[in-house]
Structure formats: C-alpha cells, structure tokens
Image (tube, rainbow, N blue to C red):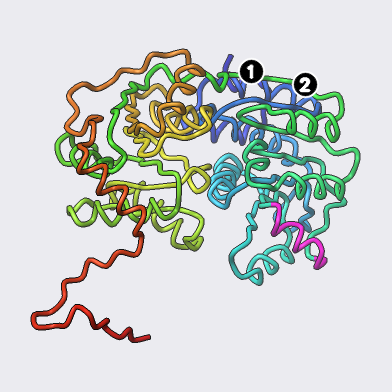
Amino acid sequence: MTFQDLNLHRNIVEVLKEENYIAPTPIQEQAIPIILEGHDLVGCAQTGTGKTAAFAIPILNYLHPIVGSKNKRKTLRTLILAPTRELAHQILDSFNTYGKYMTTKAMVIYGGVNQVPQVQQLKEGVDVLIATPGRLLDLHKQGHIDLNHLHHVVIDEADQMLDMGFINDVKKIIKLTPENRQTLLFSATMPVAIRELADAFLTKPKFVSVTPVSSTAEKVNQKVYFVQKEDKRKLLIHLLQNENYANALVFVRTKHSADNVVKALKKHEISAAAIHGDKSQSARLRVLDEFKTKQISILVATDIAARGIDIDLLPYVINFDIPNIPETYVHRIGRTGRAGNEGLAISFCGKDELAYWKDIEKLTRQQIKVVKDNPFPFREFTEEEKAAKQNDRRNPRKQNQQKPNGSNPSKKKKRRY
C-alpha cells in the first residue's frame, strides 16, 4: 500500500512526496482508513511507529474542505491532548508540515508560561488546538476556549497521562465536548484504567495494535554493564572518552541525578546539558535544539521530560539508571534504531537494580549481552570499607574540614548565618 491508495487530498499527497513518505507504517496503514471512515479508534503503538501522522493526516484531510479560505473565521474543530510540552510541540510541527499547503491553523497551549500570548492567539481563531490538560481546563474556565464545535478529540500517550496524574483532567475535558465527536485514543500500553477510559468515552471503537510494547527494535544492538552504583559516572565518562559515543541520550531516574551527571561530564570537558521538569520551557526547547544541531554532545534526561522528544538518526541511548517499570526500557531504547537505521542501547545495572533488569529480560524475552571488558565491575568491599560506609551512615553530618594550626579542638567554631 502507498499513501496514494488512501484517497487523500492532493495537497497532503504532495507534502508526503516532498517528505519522502512512500508507504505508510503499520499503524498508519491500519488507523488512517478507520479515521477517514469516521469511527472512534483505540491505537496501541509505541514511540517511533509514526503514530502522530496516523491521526494528523486524516484529520487534516477532513478539515481541508471545511476550513475554506484564509479570510474565513476560524472555529476550533480538533482538540489534541498531550501529557508534555515537548510532545505538544512535536504534534504541532507535524500538523504544520502536513498542512503546509492548506489554510488550517494549529496552535499549542501548555502551563508554566504566561497565558497572555496564548489567549491572544486563541482570540485570532484556530482550527486545531494541541494542549496539556491543566492549561486547557484553566483557559476554558476563564472563557477563552469554546469546545462546542469539536469534531475530533485525540488523547495521545494516554498511559503517560495516567502516570502523570492527568487522567481525571482528561475525563473532565471529554465531558465538556460534544457527544457526536470522533474520539481517538493512542497509548503505548493498555493498563486497566486506559481500557476503562475507552469504554466510558468512545463509541464502538475500532482497535489497532502494532509493535507490542514487549518487543524492541531489531536494529537496536543492546548491551549491559554490571557496575557498582558509585562507579556509574566513571564508567559513563570512560565510555564517552574512549568509545566516541557522541550524540547520546542518557536516561536517569531523577532531576537531581540529571544535574549531577551533567556537572561530572562538564568537569571532563564533555559538552552536556540536562532536560527535566524544573527547567523552563524556553530552556528545554533551547537545549533540545542544541542537541539536535549537535552543539551539545550529550543530553541527560528524565523519562517524563524525554517523552515526546523526536530526534532523527539518534545513534546512542544510555540507561544510566535502570527503570523500575520494564516497559519504560522499551520506550527508552526505541528512540534509537528508528526508520531502518541501526542504534546502540547501553545499560548500567547496579546491584540494587538487578531485580529490575530481570523484569526487563523477562518482558523482552531476550538475554541481553553482558560486557565482560568492564573497567568497573561488581566487587566485594573489604571489612574496612564496609565499616567506613556504616560509620558514614551513622554520621551523615560528619565534618570534613581541617582545623587550622594552633586551634583548640575543644572550642567549636561559631557559625555565621
């Protein structure tokens, strides 16, 4: 099948030719005809399968004859809910690309920034609105958003919405939309809560599923280093300096860890930056752009911040911390080895993460290659090291400062506040 077989508008077909889209991906091949026919849809597809185009293309195909000329007053007809700002921008880019020969206007709104520019854009009129749930509810309550004329409601990355605590907001939003809407729900996994959401708000939906979450891309070479937790930074620096792993995405568990890893890399003159929830939107977008243009060699990210990052030809993914949810591992390494390209996924597994690693191998049904030539392998501590560690735990506020010569150790130095 080719895109021409889908009977799409010639303006869309022309864009797809320019973008070198010849044959639809499996999710696109299954989903686009269903959406064009007007059915509700539940799509199970992981990152990198072409999911955004699977709903953007048929929605634009529907809107084109309705929108009319540029001078016609814009009416909000499509709402797309996304869990993160990065994913929202990625979806906006897709609509702008596929609709560049149309008069359709799309915009994005999200929290954490001044609402005034967003409100001004809404007043000017919009056909497609991509939004995070919190900001959408806030602006709707203020009377800036009219949801009464919607034809499409898309819930993207529904499982991530659930993980981030947005699912109740999503339910509130759907209840504000017309009953005769077409609802499309996409999720990488299908936990019970997502199935219940589909049952409650979708009408006789069609189901499509591609690339089960337990499978990893065939083109991704996977390796694991079993390493002492305290040696992970040393191992990362060793690999980056000796194996020339430039343009790598490094996953960590926490925001604090992301910042510390970046500091360690910069000390060794390795260009790196972090992206996580404490960074402002402008800072996150700037870092992403610098990484994509290779001004920064290493991008260190938490899972939530990285959701929605779309980077072409990403050669390396490094799991600095092993995720405690095995499906997350599949999502992470799915960011490399995309579009038929080869990729390398490297994992650092500490002793405290062995149970997580076993869960990953059980889910993926793979025996991932263990690197034997490891400069920082598991080791047994001496009795002296064990005693020192125990003592440090008992004295967390132990002072390491040397006392000046001639000072009286019985006198405590006064603190200055």
Q: Residue at x 73, y 44 (%)?
A: 167
Q: Residue at x 16, y 32 (%)?
A: 375
* Residue 285, quarter of the rendered image: bottom left
* Magenta-colored span: 133-143
Instruction: Check disc 1 and report the residue beneath it.
Output: 5
The answer to whether residue 233 is seen in the rendering is yes
* Residue 351, quarter of the rendered image: top left
Residue 374's place in the image compared with 160, above or below, is: above
Tag 2 secondary structure:
strand
Image quadrant for the N terminus? top right
The three-letter amino acid code for the residue at tag 1 is Asp
Whether residue 279 sits left or right of residue 383 in the image: it is right
Q: CA distance from mark 1 to mark 2?
A: 21 Å
- Seen as rendered, the residue at the extreme left is 405
The answer to whether residue 24 is seen in the rendering is no
Tag 1 secondary structure:
helix
Q: Main secondary structure of the magenta part?
A: helix
Q: Which numbered disc flags the more N-terminal residue, 1 or 2?
A: 1
The three-letter amino acid code for the residue at tag 2 is Lys
In the foreground, 171 or 319? 319
Please check the rendered image and state whether residue 8 is part of the magenta-colored stretch, yes or no: no
Q: Which mark is residue 175?
A: none
Image quadrant for the C terminus? bottom left
Query: Residue 203, percent across and down?
Result: 87, 29
Q: Residue at x 27, y 67 (%)?
A: 399
In the foreground, 98 or 258? 258
- Seen as rendered, the residue at the extreme front is 410
Residue 284's place in the image compared with 227, above or below, is: below
Q: Residue at x 63, y 30 (%)?
A: 54
In the foreground, 124 or 311? 311
Instruction: Check disc 2 and report the residue beneath it.
Output: 206
Query: Residue 142, percent across and down?
Result: 80, 68
